[in-house]
Amino acid sequence: MKDSIGRILERIDGRGYKAYKDLVGASERIGGVRVRVTRVQGDPFAPPSVVMVDAPLGDNPLYHEYPIPVADYALRLAYRLSARYSIRGAGEGHSGEVRVPRPGPVILRRSAAGIITGSRGGVVLRLRLWVGLPSRRRRILGNVAKELLLSRLPRLAVEVARGLEREEARLERHVNAWREQEFIRERLPSMGLVSFIGDGSILPRACGGCEEPLEGAVPFESPESLRVELELPTGRSVTGMGVREGLTLVAGPAFHGKTTLMEAIACGVWDHVPGDGRELVVTRRDAFWVQSENGRWVSCVDVSPWVESMPGLRDPHCWSTSDASGATSAVASLQEAVEAGSRLILIDEDWTATNFIHRDRWTEEVTGKRTLLSVSDLAPALKKAGISVVIVASGSIPLLASADTVIVMDEYKPRDATSYAEKARRVAVEAGLAPAGASYTPPSRRRLVEAFTLVKPKLRGRILEARNLRDTVDLSGLRQLEEQAQLNTLLPIAQRLTSRPGVLVAEAERLEEDIRRGEWESIDRNPGPGLSEVRWLDVLYLVNRLPGLRVTKG
């Protein structure tokens, strides 16, 4: 039987830093709190160690019924409190540090905090924390480490548990925000909607990289013709704009809120915290943002529905390139998303090649050639295939002619302009701009040809580096992720997916279910606090862009 943490620290006090490895797997109970060391850093300047702390909770029904938002709220408490429990000046490097990841503005499952059932049947708060084991001149400070692990960490866990009780009203508001958003998302398909934007929502952010809502922003107000009313499980009734299935065109002058609306819809796949302003912006979970990515890697993607004639293209059902263009990169991304199961595509003209969105027949007369069909050509066929598209495009008669819904953003307020679609259809026919009746067949799933392992991968912001990659991988197009921990989670899942030949998409879906059950060990054998919930679509975004990855049809 392994010694307790306290005994090990007494034994290794004053020894070289490597002796801290003896703590791996060691645990100790202090009162009702259990502390367990799961990972030990190799050096005081290396990333901190990982310690798991379990603290009992009371009998509040919220803990039993809604563990996800309760754990999310607990993490926010731990984030606010952890600095107080660090031991400043405890030594070199990260010595004495106690911290958890900074949570984003969404309610997610995270490895840093969870609500679990204890060995005796009660409800337990589980925190995973980064802890800097203290040393000076790389010699272990046993007494300081004992203070950190056996006094401060248990007190932190107890204070977080008490904070849940002390802030019960705020916790209930947090839980109810999650309940309402989950309820709306579940209702969307039966209502024929892909997204809902509640009246009074604040969509703009305070700045380009900010999470906070813009102070003084114009509250969202739904057009009467698109307004729907919902009775929520919390007992209140809300109204808002329902974005219908099919093709929705968002138009309007520059600087009037088109992209802001689209970004809010895109991030509506997650549940937002109270005060974010987007608590009632809810989108289907399979929504996928498509944009141009010049120079991206593409491996055996079926682009056949989009190709009219492409020089040097032998098989459009298995197209590969190491240097996709603006339009072809967007085509590949859309096809990969549909292959992965997405049936809701989001496109913004500000981020996408013009010739991917619509065609210009007069320019084609000048060039005499055409390589790719556009969204305006395939929109009717995509609808027949059950794929909805929400697209920002202000200058496309063919798209307007195909639209089921037209929303004009005018001074940050939406206006229903669907009546103009019928006029656009007449104009399109008279000008020869009507869609050409192209057909669309969703691509089949692909298989990994051979195992592919990333060697020492590292994320620098949204850029992935690895020793065996011929180039870096730019993940900036993952616009639907809300926090760094989500990006961190992509790496271990991608490593699992690419470690053996098999069907990529099915495996990604299974791993997402593991996350939704809180089984972090299936993602990372020894998980730290830095993992957050992601979708299978987000994982495959990374996998599909790995230079050198070889896949094949079916």
Image (spheres, rainbow, N blue to C red):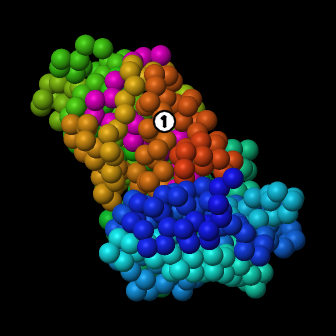
Q: What stretch of residues is rendered in magenta?
A: 530-554
Q: Residue furthest left?
A: 366
Q: Is residue 324 magenta?
A: no
In the image, taking residue 144 as reference, residue 548 lies left or right, namely: left
Pointer 1 residue: 496
Task: Answer above or below: position of 303 versus 418.
Answer: above
Location of residue 294 with respect to 20 vertically, above or below: above
Q: At x 59% / y 42%, what residue is drawn?
A: 522
The amino acid marked with disc number 1 is Arg
Residue 531 highlighted magenta (yes or no) = yes
Q: Residue furthest top?
A: 314
- Tell me what residue is drawn at x 39 percent, y 42 percent: 542
Q: Is residue 546 visible?
A: yes
Report the number of numbered marks.
Answer: 1
The foreground one among 378 and 214 is 214
* Residue 25 drawn at (x, y percent): 60, 55
Residue 389 x/y as whole percent: 49, 42
Judged from the image, the secondary structure of the residue bearing numbered disc 1 is helix
Identify which residue, 418 or 81, lies in the foreground: 81
Query: Hey, which quadrant is residue 140 in on the image?
Result: bottom left
Which residue is found at the position 17% from the left and 35% from the top?
363
Res. 424 visible in picture: no
Tell me the residue at 12%/31% (across/down): 366
Specify whether 473 is left or right of 8. left
Q: Nearer the viewer, residue 108 or 94?
A: 94
Q: Quadrant of residue 184?
A: bottom right
Expressed as whole percent of the image width and height from the top left, the position of residue 154 reads 66, 76
Q: Give coordinates of residue 309: x percent, y percent.
A: 24, 19
Q: Residues within 10 Å of mark 1 (few under 14, many from 20)?
A: some
